[in-house]
Image: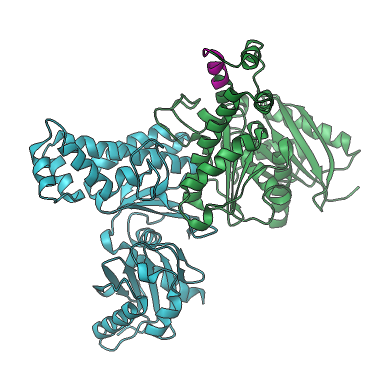
Chain colours: A cyan, B green
Amino acid sequence: MNERLVLGADVGGTSVKFVVVDADGMSIVDGSIRTDVADAGSTFALLAAEVASLLNGGTVTAVGLACAGIVDPVAGTLGRAPNLPGWEGSDLRTLLGAAFGPVACAVANDVNAALVGERHLGAGRQCRDLVMYALGTGVGGGIMIEGRLVVGARHGAAELGHVVLDRGGPPCSCGNNGCLEAYAGAVALAAEAKRLSGLPGADPDLVALCARNEVTPHVLAQLAEAGSAQVIAMFHEAGRRLGQAVGGVVNTLDPERIIIGGGVAQAGDLILGPCRVEAARIILGERSKSIPIVPAELGPRAAAVGAAVLATEEVVAR
Amino acid sequence: MNERLVLGADVGGTSVKFVVVDADGMSIVDGSIRTDVADAGSTFALLAAEVASLLNGGTVTAVGLACAGIVDPVAGTLGRAPNLPGWEGSDLRTLLGAAFGPVACAVANDVNAALVGERHLGAGRQCRDLVMYALGTGVGGGIMIEGRLVVGARHGAAELGHVVLDRGGPPCSCGNNGCLEAYAGAVALAAEAKRLSGLPGADPDLVALCARNEVTPHVLAQLAEAGSAQVIAMFHEAGRRLGQAVGGVVNTLDPERIIIGGGVAQAGDLILGPCRVEAARIILGERSKSIPIVPAELGPRAAAVGAAVLATEEVVAR
C-alpha cells in the first residue's frame, strides 16, 4: 500500500462522500457514509473507521474536508451551515485530529473544493482564473484568481447565488427577491414548474409530474427534450438569468472560463445555450464575450476530489 | 533635490493630471497639461518637458501612467479607450521610454490606479481587499484582493458600471439596459433630472436648472440639500441601485471595505445612506452586513497618486 495516501471528504446534509488518493492523485478507494447532522465528531469517527477498514490497515497522511457553509480555511472552523445545524461553530480541524490522529488537515467550503477538483482534474484544467456556479437545491459559487481561492475578508465570498438580478423578482430562500438562486436553483425551478402546471392549457405531462410530486431537474430536462414548450421556455428563462449573472461576474473578474455544475446543469444546452447568448450581450470586453461557459466534468465527486487536492497542498506547504 | 523622484500621471480625455513624489511618497510638485487625444507620444513629450521645467533640471527615475480604458499592465499597452481615440492600440511603455528615457514604467487603468492611491494614502489604508466604484460621467471600478489589483485574464475586470441590475431598466451607454452606470453615473442622473423636470408639478428650481442646461451632480446635490423632494428621491434611488450592486459584489468578493469616488459621490450620504441600507439587506454573511461603505478621500488626484505608487513598486520589483 502506498505510504502517502490522502483522504478527501465532502460533507452534505445527508451523506459524506469520500475518496482516498495516492501520491499521484489516483483514486484508491471511494465511498460514502451517513452524516450525523447533530454531531461532527461522531461523523468523523465513523468516517475514520470506514476508511481504515477499506484500506486494510493503511493510514492516511492528510485529510481534506469540504462542507456546505461558511468555512474559515485558516482557523479550520465552520460558521453558518444551514444543512448541518449541529456542526455550526465547530472547530473542524481539532475534531478531525481527534478522529484521524496528527495528520495534515485542510477544510474548505464545498463549492470552493469542487472548483479546486474541477481545476485539477475536470473542466478547469490549465486555468488559474475561474468562476464556478453550482446549481443545486440552492445556488453556490467558487472563485479562483491566480490559482488561489477567493474566500473573502470574512469568509463570505463566492455566494454567487445571492446576486440580485431583479429586485422585483421571485422570493429567495435568503429573504430577498430576485437572487440568481430564485431563478436557477432546483427548488426555484420546481416551484416555477408547479406554477406553470396550474395555468390554463398547461402541458399534461407537466401537470401529471407535478401531481405525482416528482419534480426534479432531471425529469424536467427529460420533458424538455421530449418537446414540452412550457418546460423548454422555463429552462431558457433560467439560462438567461444565469447569463445575466455570468455577464456581471465576467465584467467584474474577467476569468478564463466559467464552469456550471450541480443537478440543474444536467439540462445542458437547454440552460447553457441561452446563458451564453445573454452573457455575451452583457460582457463589455470584446475578447471576453467568447469566454468558455462549460459544464462541470467531475459530477458529485468534485468536492471530495478537490478536498483531497487541498489536503495534498497542505502537506506540501508544511 | 532628492535623487529618487517618481512621476505619476493620470490621462483623461481633456487633461493629464500629474504629481511628482519623493522616496517617502511626499508630493514635490503637481500640475496638469492638455491631453492630445490624437497622439500619445506628443502628449508624453509635453509632459516630460513640463515636469523637467518644474523640477529645475531634476529628473524622475520612474513613471506611472493611469489611463481610462482597457490597459494591459504587463505588456504596457492600451486597448479600448473611448475617451482617447488616437491612443487606442498604443504601446504606452515604449512611448514613455521615448519621452522620459530609460526609466521604470508602470501603466494601469485609471480607476485601478485611483484604488491604489486610496489604499496607500486615502480611504483604503491598512486594507488588502478593496472594491472601489468611481461614479463619474460613467461608472468605473477597481478591485484589489490580497493587496493585488485584479485585472482579469483579458484585462476586462472591474467594469463594475456594467453589472446589470434590471434588464428592463434604462438604456446604458454600452448598449444594454439597467446597468449600474444607467442609474448612478453623472450622465444618467442628468437624464433622470431632465425627465423629472418635465413631469407635472416638477420642482421649479429643477425646471430652471434643466432649462439653463446646468445639470451637474454638484448642483443637483445642492438642490437636494435645499430640500427638493424630487431630487432627494432621485439620489435615494441611485443610492439603492448602487447598494444593489454593492450587495452583489460583497456576496461575490467579501472585501474589507467599499470605496465610493467620483463626482456623483460628492452627494455624500444622500446616496451612501440608501446604498448602505440596500447593501446590508442583500449581503448574506452576518458579519459582512456592516462592511464599511466609505467615500473616497483623495479626490481627482487619486489616480495620479496611485500611478506614482505603482511606478515606485515597479522600481522595487526590479
The segment highlighted magenta reads B192-200
Which is nearer the eye, B58 or B18? B18
Residue B71, visible in the rendered structure: no
**Magenta stretch contains residue A146:** no
- Residue shown at 83% from the left, 36% from the top: B51
**Total numbered labels:** 0
Residue farthest toward the top in the current orientation of the protein = B211
Which is nearer the eye, A116 or A195? A195
Is B35 drawn above or below residue A302 in the view shown?
above
**Where is residue A156 shown, x and y percent of the image?**
48, 57
Which is nearer the eye, B118 or B186? B186
**Where is residue A41 shown, x and y percent of the image?**
36, 79
**Where is residue A96 shown, x and y percent of the image?**
40, 79
Looking at the image, residue A215 sits to the left or right of residue A41; the answer is: left
Q: Main secondary structure of the magenta part?
A: helix
Is A112 drawn above or below residue A38 in the view shown?
above
Q: Which quarter shows the N terminus of chain A?
A: bottom left
- Residue shown at 37% from the left, 83% from the top: A99
**Where is residue A279 shown, x and y percent of the image?**
38, 37
Looking at the image, residue A245 sits to the left or right of residue A222; the answer is: right
**Magenta stretch contains residue B199:** yes
Looking at the image, residue A174 sits to the left or right of residue B69; the answer is: left
- Residue shown at 79% from the left, 50% from the top: B25
Which is nearer the eye, B30 or A90? A90
Residue A311, visible in the rendered structure: yes
- Residue shown at 36% from the left, 39% from the top: A243
Residue farthest toward the bottom in the current orientation of the protein = A57
Is B173 drawn above or below residue A143 in the view shown?
above
